[in-house]
Image (cartoon, rainbow, N blue to C red):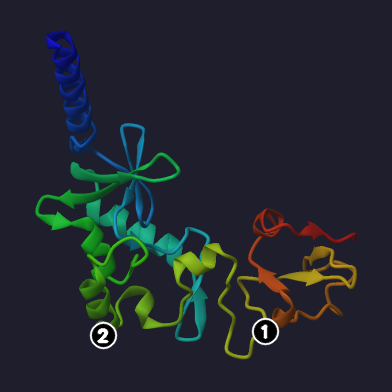
Amino acid sequence: MKLRHLIFALALATLAVGTAAAQSPIVGVVSVIDGDTLEIQGQRIRLHGIDAPEREQFCEKDGKQYRCGQQAALALSDKIGRTTVRCEQRDIDRYKRFVAVCSLGNVDLNAWMVRQGWAVAYRQYSRDYVDDESAAQTEKAGIWAGRFIEPANWRRGERLQSANQTTTDACQIKGNISRSGERIYHVPGARDYGPTRIDESKGERWFCSEDEALKAGWRRSAQ
């Protein structure tokens, strides 16, 4: 009986040590991957409770599209500079990234990104930054100054179209679906580019790059 108790006690001690190690803060100089992802000493860290536009994502302001995903990453990078960041782990996501609240001194970087309008509150996982989002929306900060697609919806394939639902200077590749159901994209200058019309109600869409079209399952048309 005593041996059994000893084994149980050792197991609990090992579990406690492992849990403490997993929750130890990560501290160091960071590399900014995008508006909600950092890297410290080779460890990817996803900022808890927020969702920033993807690097390839476009938003619209004053009728013109711009790379809001790139702007979000630059804003975070400029804010941090080469200053040491401290990240408190909350979870580990399906990509094996630590999910954390990261601070620059006394500044909660997660909250700062939402408050500046370069990320939205990721309500699917947390409501910690809903008030910051409301303030950014009221002040028309960052992406709230114009139109944008929620980052989660953008990752599912939704794209921002101009007011008259035509292509933009940024996204000119036509993703057409043939009568047989084959998904084919047409680049400017291709033989059938001009006559091809996009009907989004049928699942057809515009792409900003060939890589984006290929990843979505379209193939390039014959020239």
Cα distance between the residues tagged 1 and 2: 29 Å
Q: In the figure, residue 49 lies in which quadrant? A: bottom left
- Side (left or right) of 54 relative to 143: right
Residue at the extreme bottom = 164
Q: Which residue corresponds to mark 1?
A: 166
Inspect this view and state whether residue 169 appears: yes
Residue 101's x, y, as percent?
Answer: 22, 51
Residue at the extreme left = 106
Residue drawn at point x = 51 percent, y = 65 percent: 57
Label 1 sits on a secondary structure element that is: loop
Question: Of label 1 and label 2, which has the lower sequence position?
Answer: 2
Q: In the figure, residue 169 lies in which quadrant? A: bottom right
Residue 146's x, y, as percent?
Answer: 41, 82
- Side (left or right) of 186 relative to 169: right
The relative height of residue 194 versus residue 90 in the rendered view (above or below) is below
Residue 177's x, y, as percent?
Answer: 81, 70
Kindly identify the amino acid type of the residue bearing the numbered disc 2.
Thr
Mark seen at residue 138? 2
Q: In the figure, residue 180 lies in which quadrant? A: bottom right
Inspect this view and state whether residue 83 appears: no
Quarter the N terminus occupies: top left
Mark 1 or mark 2, which is nearer to you?
2
